[in-house]
Amino acid sequence: MIISVISAFISTITFSVVFHVQKKHLLICGAVGALGWLIYLLCLDKNLSPIISTFIASLLVTQLSYILAKKRRTPVTVFLIAGIIPLVPGVGLYRTMSAILDSNYSLAVNYATLTFQLSAVIAGAIVIIALLPLLWRKPQRRRKI
């Protein structure tokens, strides 16, 4: 598990370098990606499904990205996009295409369904964390004109 988390750290930093993240944010981006991957692995270790594990890890990465963006005065996407990268279901896409090329369509549908579900929970977690502050805010009174 340690090697996997270190790999997630390095791959997140590499992704950040490719997309021109400032040097002062690279280690933090790597830490966010590694922490998200660690949470994912710990959830899988507790016998949670990959979908629930991805959802929990995505919630954590998104919340951490918002906190770091506010603290470091930088756009949230700097940390969010880089931190989500280890959770993106790239293997599922590969397996789907491989099964299609092998004419194993039922297996391809299974892989595609899982990949779509994983992508949906990542997007859902991002939306939930982004909308929570709007729900907690007091409604503003409208002035009569």
Image: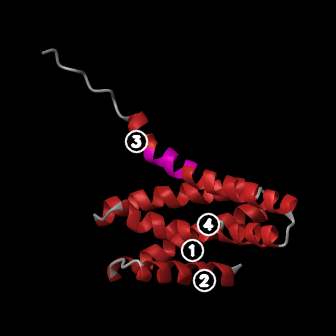
Q: Residue furthest top?
A: 144
Report x, y in % for residue 97.
73, 69
- Could you tell me if the residues under marks 2 and 3 are in contact, i.e. CB atoms within 8 Å? no
- Which portion, as a residue range, is magenta? 124-130
In space, the residues marked 2 and 4 are separated at their CA atoms by 14 Å
According to the image, what is the colour scheme of the structure? secondary structure
Quadrant of the image containing the C terminus? top left
Residue under circle 1?
34
In space, the residues marked 4 and 3 are separated at their CA atoms by 24 Å
Q: Residue 10: which quarter of the image?
A: bottom right
Q: Amino acid at mark 3?
A: Pro
Residue under circle 3?
133
Q: Amino acid at mark 2?
A: Ile
Q: Amino acid at mark 1?
A: Ala
Q: Residues within 10 Å of mark 2 (few under 14, many from 20)?
A: some
Tell me which numbered mark, 1 or 2, is placed earlier along the sequence.
2
In space, the residues marked 2 and 3 are separated at their CA atoms by 33 Å
Q: Residues within 10 Å of mark 1 (few under 14, many from 20)?
A: many
Report x, y in % for residue 60.
54, 58
- Mark 4 element type: helix
Q: Nearer the viewer, mark 2 or mark 4?
A: 4
Q: Residue at x 50, y 47 (%)?
A: 127
Residue under circle 2?
6
- Could you tell me if the residues under marks 1 and 2 are in contact, i.e. CB atoms within 8 Å? yes
Q: Amino acid at mark 4?
A: Leu
Q: Is residue 66 left or right of residue 48?
A: left
Residue under circle 4?
87
